[in-house]
Image (cartoon, rainbow, N blue to C red):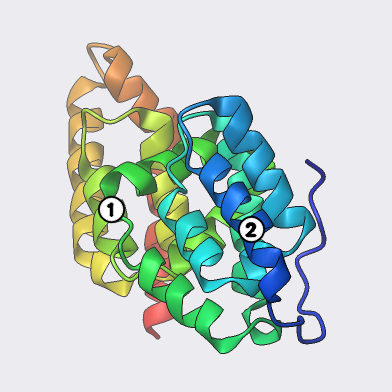
Amino acid sequence: MAQRRLIPEARLRELQTDELPDLLEALLQLTGPELAARQTGLRRLVEADYHRRSPLAAALLARGVGERDLELRREWVVALAEVIVGTSASPEQVAHWLRHSLGQLRRREIYGLLQLAAASPGHTGLVHLVLDQCSFSGGTLLQILQDRKADIQIRVSAAHALAAIGYLDAAPAVASLLNRIASRLAGQEEMGFAPSLEAEADLLLPALESLNDALSEAAL
């Protein structure tokens, strides 16, 4: 599915009654158990602009952002970003239901978005756009960042996302985490780094320092 330009457009036409059967069939495919059906459902929604003209389509698209297949999740986020950017051109109820559904995202969906950002850097900005619309994302991103059991690349993605959305409440925890990692690294200097500490030194520490600087600047 080709990525389309994410720019606001002239107001979209209202959904017509004779389009409802096609919309319903596309939504059934979108939420189905078979990957091929979900791929077809998403393509049909985007081609007909249903995701930007139907409140139900926008809501289901937001709720399904944790799609299991990474490639389809990438296209899913592109389509969702189109809705977010283009809400001024959509019927008012589309924006209303989109905000409501994005407010329901929890750790599983947010973790899946971070996986996408880590695997596909070119889509990081779109992931941040989606996370910025989720009222609970800041706290969840911070939890993931602090979770030493989480994949280091996911924690790095969480740090970048926190900087992008400007979650100022994270500042004390980020400073504390920076100090803890620096202390552990200092204690390992003479003995050589353990693999987990080496990953933190090479990958996570720079991301944390950048996040700390971004939050400090945003607080001014």
The residue that disc 2 covers is 21
What's the residue type where badge 2 is placed? Answer: Pro
Q: Position of residue 207 (x, y in %)?
A: 44, 46
Work out which quarter of the rendered image holds the N terminus and state it: top right
Residue at the spot 37% in from the left edge and 30% down from the top edge? 152
Q: Position of residue 71 (x, y in %)?
A: 62, 31
What's the residue type where badge 1 is placed? Answer: Arg
Q: Position of residue 9 (x, y in %)?
A: 80, 80
Residue at the spot 40% in from the left edge and 50% down from the top edge? 159
Q: How many marks?
A: 2
Q: Is residue 75 visible?
A: no
Q: Nearer the viewer, mark 2 or mark 1?
A: 2
Upstream in sequence: badge 2 or badge 1: 2
Disc marking residue 106? 1
- Using the rendered view, name the quadrant where residue 165 is placed: bottom left
Is disc 2 in contact with disc 1, using a CB cutoff of under 8 Å? no
Taking 40 as reference, is 42 above or below it? below
Work out which quarter of the rendered image holds the C terminus and state it: bottom left
Q: Position of residue 20 (x, y in %)?
A: 63, 65
Neighbour tally class for label 2: few under 14, some 14-19, many 20 plus, Cα within 10 Å:
few
- Using the rendered view, name the quadrant where residue 94 is placed: bottom right
